[in-house]
Amino acid sequence: MSAQGFGPVAGSAIFQGISGQKKIIMAANIRVAHVAKGIFRAAKDTDSAVFMELARSESDLKGGYTGMTPEVFSEKMTAAARETGCDTWALHADHISVKKGDAAEVEGTKELINAQVKAGYTSFAIDASHLFNFEGKNVREELAENIRVTTELAHFIRKQMNGREFGLEVEVGEIGRKDTGGLILTKPEEAVEFIKALNENDVFPQVIAIANGSSHGHAYDANGNVVEQLSIDIPQTKAIAQALRDNQLAVGIAQHGITGTPRDLINLHFPKGDIIKGNVGTFWQDVVYSTFKVFEPELYKNIQEWTLEKYRPLNPGKKDRQIFDGNCKMAIKEFYKEIYAVDEATEKAIESMAYAESLVFFRAFSSQGSASLVRRAIR
Ligand SMILES: [Zn+2]
């Protein structure tokens, strides 16, 4: 733990702490920092460990679409943890995406990782899942580029962390990717081959993200309305976890794209312990915007107008509601100053709502007690 006592712990310590438990640890994408205190308070009150994370698209050296660089994100999260007295959380780099895999992109990625390490990140998700060779003659050949880039970046992280422990997530099967037959799902043998190959290269992730039917953000019906559904393929997810266990690979599953999945169904049907990390992103943005609607109507209206003006021409035929929904995240950077200058009452409402919603997530994920387990693992 950090000198102040409220800095992030190693992501690996969290995974170690809950090993063998039927628990999922929430990983919250904090696009607007106002939700952080509510989440931390709920984590503390329920004795839950938690990840605070942003993806490369959300936070990079230029701030990403949240306007927060890794340094700013780290400062804001650490301040919120200290203020709320939450001491069992990890600072996670979600989707460190590499989409082409060429030398320039890998070098640029290393610069981002450098900044994240310097900012005190304790957990990293390398996402080279886009690098898939459809002409490969076998699984190993299909995944060769993903394996190569993931290995290079994982070794780089280890070197930069200089002896400090860290969490490592890797990704096989691009989440939400579709072909003519619908979503393409990861097969058990792909996950096993991928982890085995990484282990051979001296890379030992604790968690793997797979394509198992979820998509990022909301799902919509034909009229552009948001629908809530249990989209993940649970038998396939269990089969992948079982295949990993059968091969003595101690790697859990990171579930991406949880927004929109009813929490009663998560509570009753998610294979907790097979899935060990649950990413919740868009949901927290909804908490912020739904509060703005009432507490900051003028700001909300400006955000709405800016988003629709900019993205309507790019989305012909789509309903305004869906255009706003899909692109309002891009307004966060544009309205950064206004968003971080809202009334105390607005902040309080967001914090309270984030608190209550976190209690529901932590219960649905069965994460109560995980913080104590992690503290024990650290000692
Ligand atoms: Zn994701």
Image: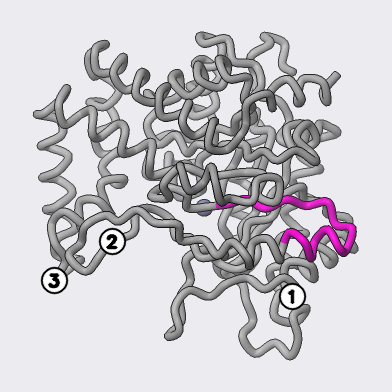
Q: Residue at x 42, y 22 (%)?
A: 355
**For discs 1 and 3, the disc positioned in front in the rendered view:** 3
Quadrant of res 24: top right
Measured as percent of width and height from the top left, residue 225 is found at: 21, 57
Question: Are the two marked residues, 3 and 2, in contact with CB atoms closer than 8 angstroms?
Answer: no
> Which residue appears at 78% of the width and 78% of the height?
140
- Tell me whether the residue at label 1 lies in contact with that at label 2, contact meaning CB atoms closer than 8 angstroms: no
Q: Position of residue 299 (x, y in %)?
A: 15, 30
Residue flagged by tag 2: what amino acid is it? Tyr
Residue 281 position by quadrant = top left
Q: Which residue is mark 3?
A: 317
- Amino acid under disc 1: Ala
**Magenta residue span:** 241-255
- Relative to 50, is 194 on the left or the right? right
Local packing at callout 2 (Cα closer than 10 Å; few below 14, some 14-19, many 20+) is few
Q: Which mark is residue 144?
A: 1
Q: Which residue is mark 2?
A: 220
Which of the two labelled residues, at mark 1 and mark 3, occupies the earlier sequence position?
1
The part of the image, by quadrant, that contains residue 202 is: bottom right
- The C terminus appears in which quarter of the rendering? top right
Whether the magenta-drawn stretch holds residue 15 is answered as no
Q: Is residue 166 visible?
A: no
Q: Is disc 3's CB within 8 Å of ligand 1?
A: no
| Identity of the residue drawn at 51% across and 15% down | 79
**SS category of the residue bearing label 2:** strand
| Mark closest to the chain's N terminus, 1 or 2 | 1
